[in-house]
Amino acid sequence: MSQAWIQHTFSRKRFRTRNQATALAILGVAILLILGSLYLSQVASFAITNRQIEELIRQRDDLKRQNEGLIGEIASLRTVPRLFARAEAIGFRPATNADIDYLLIDGYNPNRDRLAVTADDISELEAPAPVYDETFGSWLEQQLALLQDQFRSFGA
Amino acid sequence: MQRMSSQQATIQARLPFVALFLILMAAYLIINLANFQFFPRSVRQELEKIGNSITNTTLRIPAERGRIYDRDGEPLAFNLVQYRLGVSPALVSDSEALLTALSEILDIDDFELYRKITSDRVWEFVAGPISAEQGQAIAALDNISLGLEEIPKRFYPQGELAAHVIGIVVDDGLRGALGVEGAYNDTLSGRVLDLSVSKVPFDLPQDRPAEQRGQDIVLTLDRDVQFWVESELSKAVEAYNAFRGAIIVMDPRNGDVLALANQPSIDPNSFLDIVDPNLRVNPAVNETYEPGTLMQALTVAGALDQGIVSEFWTYNDTGYLEVGGRDIWNPNFQSHGVTDVNSILTNSLDIGAATIALEMGTERFYSMMRAFGLGQATGVGLFAEERGELRIPGDSDWNESFLGLNSHGQNVEVTPMQMITAYSAIANGGIMRQPRIVRRVINEESAEDARPTTIRRVVSAETAEILTDMLTRVVEDGAPEAQLPGYTIAGKPGTARISTAVAFEEGANAKILSFIGFLPADDPQAVVMIKLDRPDGDYGYQVAAPVFRRVAERLVILLEIPDDTVRSRLTAAEAEISASES
């Protein structure tokens, strides 16, 4: 009996089998651990990036708000009554027509871009309404012509 | 043995039933399992909702309203952010530290603040609206018990300037009322969004969608012109002790409203403080009045265009005329004998206008008045525009006397915007341009100026030219107060009595005095309408014409309109250039 046990215990074949199974199990655990840590590191990286994005969005919104505030401040400082009062305080006065000299420069037409009502504007208004005169025959001809054009383009 | 086989036979007989029962049960379970796996949409949505309620939180993102600019890009209305602060007392770990921190930022009584921080309630409102700076300082505390909610605030940096044109917003900044804010509410207002935001840190943070923002609007208003017009109007209302007044400046070539002023004005930044409901409307488009003698020019224009009268036409003015049972008298009950068309306009002769209307007949007269846009909203782009009232034959309350009365602006209701649009058509060679206050809507697709559009040709170019000459003589002979040295002005003063439901109102100031003029008469670049309600003074040429001159003095500088001499030299130079090019 003892010999049988000894043979059983030290059976190299069976020991090898168990050794392989353990190794496989350890390998499996190791792979799982690697995959798990990869997953966790990826997730942590996502979380950090998302946190950074959130922070950037918050910063952008704050900057936008500050920008709006500055626009408001600038607009308040640039109101006409304020500019007018400031100009008067430093000795300016509103120009009158007598203060203005118009200089004519040879070859320069200051009215070249001026938007004026021309006969073209009216002709647009008075243009006849488009008439619907398409027939089935003309439609069919048009479709055939389109098809022929397509075949020609394939051939080319 | 016999007994065993009997039991086996019984079992064998019952076995199919048991098997069938088990098969049916299995099928039932499979069907239910399949049903569970492939839920109907409504169930799936409900389950998703339950799931999201655990992982997501809903943020209400306020709509960002579009900005409003003047034609040169100066901001007239935009948004500031304010906050509303609340606290969850249960989450406060150190109430004294929080009290100290908040009391340094907020201007609230410490006792009141402490009471809120230590309240038994789940959520306690602390303060609001508070400024963006205060809000950011509180956010920097990074205290989980505090909650900040954004509140959009509309800000009008120019204060009272063009207040009636820009308008106001109500309902916590969500809805526009009055002016452009009201008329273009759909364009300006963004969309309030309830955004479901994931609390899971691995989910990508959601940004507010760009399309949520309202579109920006650029007006045709010129801020500088508006300022001068408002200051001149303010002086005029005070000088003539008027109840109120309005001035509109329009470019007749494209229908752009360059300025629109009302006095008294409002401050849109503190609109809720205004208690007088009369100030919450824009009288230039929201209220009508009887235009009085301003209408005579339209009557004459219609008759000239229809070939009923010529510029040399005359009639015998006896000082009295009866039309449809109503007596018509000239101002001051004067008779003028044999009189021409020019005199009708220069002396504002009601009988002359009524005689011309009778010559035209109802059909021609009213078709011309409709062509001038009376009784129809102009579509200028301002909130709740009135369309006025032009009763025509066939209407239950029209009678024959209306033809005579309408010819000189009685029993007809118009808005100042309608009158200036009609005169602009004359100034623009007979072509009526669509009046507009919005020049451009800026969105993601385009930021192009809207092309000016034409409503119709009202009168021929020839008629417009003849009438312009007549209106020039009106200013020279009948309203020299409107003349501006160096410039040819065409215009017409208007005097209208204020009518009640039954008769004209009595009293020295029961009238509306006005003037519409354009300059330069030979190449009109600006049409100006002055209107003063219940002023001291008797006639439009005495009161409104001088105001027109003062506005025109400033306009020619701001709009860079050279005087007649310079312009004639320019015209000669232009002709020379075109000759050399051809």
Image: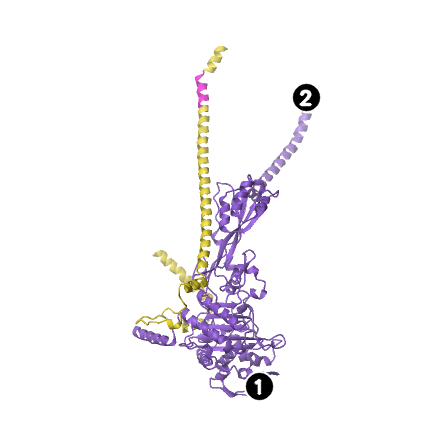
Chain colours: A yellow, B purple
| Dominant secondary structure of the residues highlighted in magenta in the image | helix
Start-end of magenta stretch: A11-21
Residue B417 in the image, given as x and y percentages of width and height: 51, 70
What subunit carries mark 1? Answer: B
- Disc 1 is placed on an element classified as strand
Label 2 to label 1: alpha-carbon separation: 142 Å
Looking at the picture, does residue B24 appear above or below residue A3?
Answer: below
Residue B71 shows in this picture? no
- Residue type, mark 2 in image: Met
Residue B579 in the image, given as x and y percentages of width and height: 31, 75
| Crowding near the residue tagged with mark 2, few <14, some 14–19, many ≥20 C-alpha atoms within 10 Å | few
| Horizontal side of residue A11 vs B31, given as left or right | left
Q: Nearer the viewer, mark 2 or mark 1?
A: 1
**Label 2 and label 1 in one chain:** yes
Quickly name the residue at label 2. B1
Q: Which disc is residue B320 wearing?
A: 1
Q: Is residue A74 magenta?
A: no
- Residue type, mark 1 in image: Tyr
Residue B549 shows in this picture? yes
